[in-house]
Image (cartoon, grey):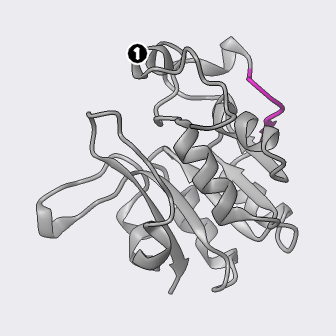
Amino acid sequence: MSDIDLPAYTRPYLRSQCVFGHITPELILSLKKYIGSRKVLEVYAGQGYLTYYLREQGITIQATSLFNSHDATWLRGTKTRVEEKSCLSAVKEYSGLFDILLVVWPTTDEDLAKSVQYLSKDIPIIFIGEITDYDQNFLGGCATDKFFAQVEERHEESCLIEYDRGGIGCDRAAVFYRK
């Protein structure tokens, strides 16, 4: 199927490591294909599990996260190098040095929404998490309404990211751009 070795990465194992996304070889390979040679800034990287596998695939990625979540994941260490930095600080500091913003299971704070204004309209935001959808009466637990009000999804690009929720949850992958 792939050359990515994820032997223990079942949903229960990921949850036990406080990893909220569902990392699969298909996700990693589809991200690799979508990203190509572009440079990535990942915010809310947590312990760096996704970053680790993308780096193994040759992706140039700068991972940042605040180590202050309610579950104390930072005490476990990181899978790879993750710089301690807020989303807003990272987007400002690395402006012009990345081509894609990767956001996976962000916390519901205002940082991501505030960061959007610093992004060029041609920077894709790969978002994996719960996405609010008022038409479906679904209030997502990732990001804020202010973030979603500032971006628009490009469905033709979202469908290129293969994200399997593992049979549970309401999270999904989407590619957004600043309006």
State left or right for residue 172 relative to residue 168: right
Residue 42 appears at what percent x and percent y?
A: 69, 51
Q: Residue furthest front?
A: 1
What amino acid is found at the position of numbered circle 1 in the picture?
Pro
Residue 173 appears at what percent x and percent y?
A: 44, 56
Please say whether residue 22 is visible from this viewpoint.
yes
State left or right for residue 108 relative to residue 30: left
Give the residue at mark 1. 12
Residue 34 in magenta stretch: no
- At 13% from the left edge and 63% from the top edge, which residue is drawn? 136
Residue 129 appears at what percent x and percent y?
A: 42, 48
Work out whether 99 lies above or below 161. Answer: below
Quarter where residue 73 is shown: top right
- At 69% from the left edge and 34% from the top edge, which residue is drawn? 3
Please say whether residue 153 is visible from this viewpoint.
no
Start and end of the magenta stretch? Answer: 78-84
Quadrant of the rendering where the N terminus is positioned: top right
Work out whether 76 lies above or below 33. Answer: above
- At 58% from the left edge and 67% from the top edge, which residue is drawn? 125
The one nearer the camera, 74 or 100, is 100
Quarter where residue 83 is shown: top right
- Magenta stretch: dominant secondary structure: loop
Residue 82 in magenta stretch: yes
State left or right for residue 94 relative to residue 15: right
Element type at mark 1: helix
